[in-house]
């Protein structure tokens, strides 16, 4: 792969422009790495913790240390970090099923939750296994025109004593609204607690971990959940998810993950403890690599005349970058370029395809070492106006740089 002089020049200009932003990202990674080291030291992480268990997985000392470390890092009392969570959706679903009882209401504070969670809520009371089918009601507070939280409407809605949990999605997910800063999550949590002290604040933390130096547990969230093949797995975790929060709520969620009476006491780690610890050790750094890749992507695509969010110069509260292409052709070329620049399956040509849970065909570019790991450079887009690509990840900025350049070249070649 060789690149035009014009593109390489543009890349140099962008890198010079985002220099200060990169330095700030590195500083955050440095502070978060210290938090990880401090937690490992406080819980006396040792080689013996890497041994792990099979079968039922009783008394897995490594798993227990990993969960105490995670609780510290997330600012919570307790945590459940398990390979048995099949993905982030599963972890968030367990959190919600644990926190809510029939007759209560779930309030989604920032419009609709992430696409895959729509089925956890239930489109109606007949959706098998959903919260609605169990007798949990659901209300959704639309975001303001600027994409921010409608605090007055949220606080008014949660005053209802039937409200058992309030879901806050930290990242933008597949929406065009900006991600929430920890400052905003603190304000929301505070206001919700004042309006209804018994409602659990549940944060979908996907893509947000280690982007700032505090996590939602540090600002009062009751329960947090996310995926290990995103930020906190550091690119090494092969599967899994986590829940962190107040002990009572973590235990209720654990009863959902396994079975009542078993909870978090079982769950073999199958030789993965070392990888999970090492991934967590790398996670602040890898998150920084993904952030730099996103900032660089924004800078390049701005220069090529496309509309991006966040802007290259804007502060970041998750690792997602959107680029709106306005037409299907450049979007396809961009996604195919990302695939071409990937370390794995670079020869594959992604095609838009019908996906379960999505109304429009979706194109996905992902040449990852771990299947579906979106902490690795990847990009997906529903094929509908305004033809927006959602890009995230990048295990190293160096590989992210070449991946973005490959995608930019793919756009320009076809324009010529
Ligand atoms: C990725 C993600 C999820 C969960 O997705 P999985 O693919 O099930 O891991 C939930 N919410 C948000 C905002 C996400 O980005």
Image (tube, grey):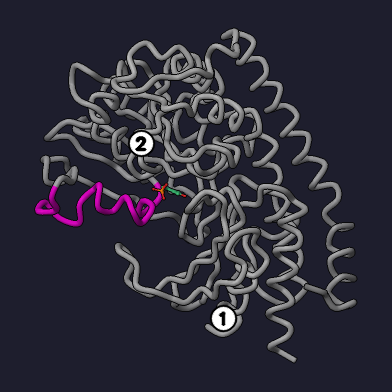
**In the image, what residue occupies the spot 90% across and 71% down?**
9
Using the image as rendered, state which of residue 158 and residue 91 is in the foreground: 91
Crowding around mark 2 (Cα neighbors within 10 Å: few <14, some 14 to 19, many 20+) is many
- In the image: residue 2, left or right of residue 376: right
Span colored in magenta:
110-128
**Which mark, residue 85?**
2
Q: Mark 2 and mark 1: span between their CA atoms?
A: 37 Å
Using the image as rendered, state which of residue 416 and residue 109 is in the foreground: 416
On the image, the x and y values in percent for residue 117 come to 31, 50
- Placement of the C terminus among the 4 image quadrants: bottom right
**In the image, what residue occupies the spot 44% across and 44% down?**
169
Labels 2 and 1 touching (C-beta < 8 A): no
Image quadrant in which you'd find residue 86 = top left
As displayed, is residue 206 above or below residue 266? below
- In the image: residue 398, left or right of residue 261: right
**In the image, what residue occupies the spot 56% across and 78% down?**
332
- Placement of the N terminus among the 4 image quadrants: bottom right
Residue topped by disc 1: 326
- In the image: residue 16, left or right of residue 215: right
Q: Is residue 129 magenta?
A: no
As displayed, is residue 275 above or below residue 377? above
Secondary structure character of the magenta stretch overall: loop
As displayed, is residue 311 above or below residue 8? above
Closer to the observer: label 2 or label 1?
2
* Kind of element beneath mark 2: loop
* Kind of element beneath mark 1: loop
On the image, the x and y values in percent for residue 297 come to 71, 62
């Amino acid at each position: 792969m060789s690149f035009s002089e014009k593109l390489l020049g543009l890349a140099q200009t962008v890198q010079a422009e985002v220099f200060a932003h990169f330095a700030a990202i590195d500083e955050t990674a440095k502070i978060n790495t210290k938090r990880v080291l401090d937690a490992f030291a406080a819980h006396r992480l040792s080689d013996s913790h890497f041994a792990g268990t099979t079968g039922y997985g009783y008394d897995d000392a490594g798993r227990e240390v990993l969960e105490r470390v995670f609780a510290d890092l997330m600012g919570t009392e307790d945590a459940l970090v398990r390979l048995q969570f099949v993905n982030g959706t599963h972890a968030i679903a367990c959190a919600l099923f644990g926190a809510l009882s029939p007759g209560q209401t779930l309030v989604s504070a920032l419009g609709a939750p992430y696409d895959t969670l729509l089925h956890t809520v239930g489109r109606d009371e007949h959706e098998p296994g959903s919260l609605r089918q169990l007798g949990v009601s659901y209300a959704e507070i639309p975001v303001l025109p600027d994409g921010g939280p409608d605090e007055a409407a949220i606080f008014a809605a949660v005053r209802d004593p039937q409200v058992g949990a309030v879901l806050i999605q930290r990242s933008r997910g597949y929406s065009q609204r900006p991600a929430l800063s920890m400052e905003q999550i603190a304000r929301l949590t505070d206001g919700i607690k004042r309006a209804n002290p018994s409602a659990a604040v549940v944060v979908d933390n996907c893509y947000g971990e280690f982007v700032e130096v505090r996590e939602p547990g540090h600002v009062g969230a009751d329960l947090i959940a996310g995926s290990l093949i995103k930020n906190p797995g550091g690119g090494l975790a092969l599967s899994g998810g986590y829940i962190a929060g107040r002990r009572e709520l973590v235990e209720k969620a654990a009863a959902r993950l396994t079975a009542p009476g078993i909870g978090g006491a079982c769950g073999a780690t199958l030789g993965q403890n070392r990888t999970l610890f090492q991934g967590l050790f790398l996670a602040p750094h890898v998150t920084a690599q993904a952030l730099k890749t996103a900032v660089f992507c924004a800078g390049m695509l701005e220069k090529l005349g496309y509309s991006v969010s966040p802007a290259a110069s804007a502060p970041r509260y998750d690792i997602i970058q959107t680029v709106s292409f306005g037409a299907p052709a450049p979007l396809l070329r961009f996604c195919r370029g990302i695939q071409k620049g990937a370390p794995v399956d670079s020869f594959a040509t992604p095609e838009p395809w019908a996906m379960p849970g999505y109304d429009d065909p979706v194109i996905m570019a992902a040449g990852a070492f771990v299947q579906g790991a979106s902490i690795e450079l990847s990009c997906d887009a529903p094929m509908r106006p305004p033809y927006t690509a959602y890009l995230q990840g990048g295990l190293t900025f160096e590989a992210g740089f070449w991946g973005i350049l490959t995608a930019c070249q793919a756009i320009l070649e076809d324009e010529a």
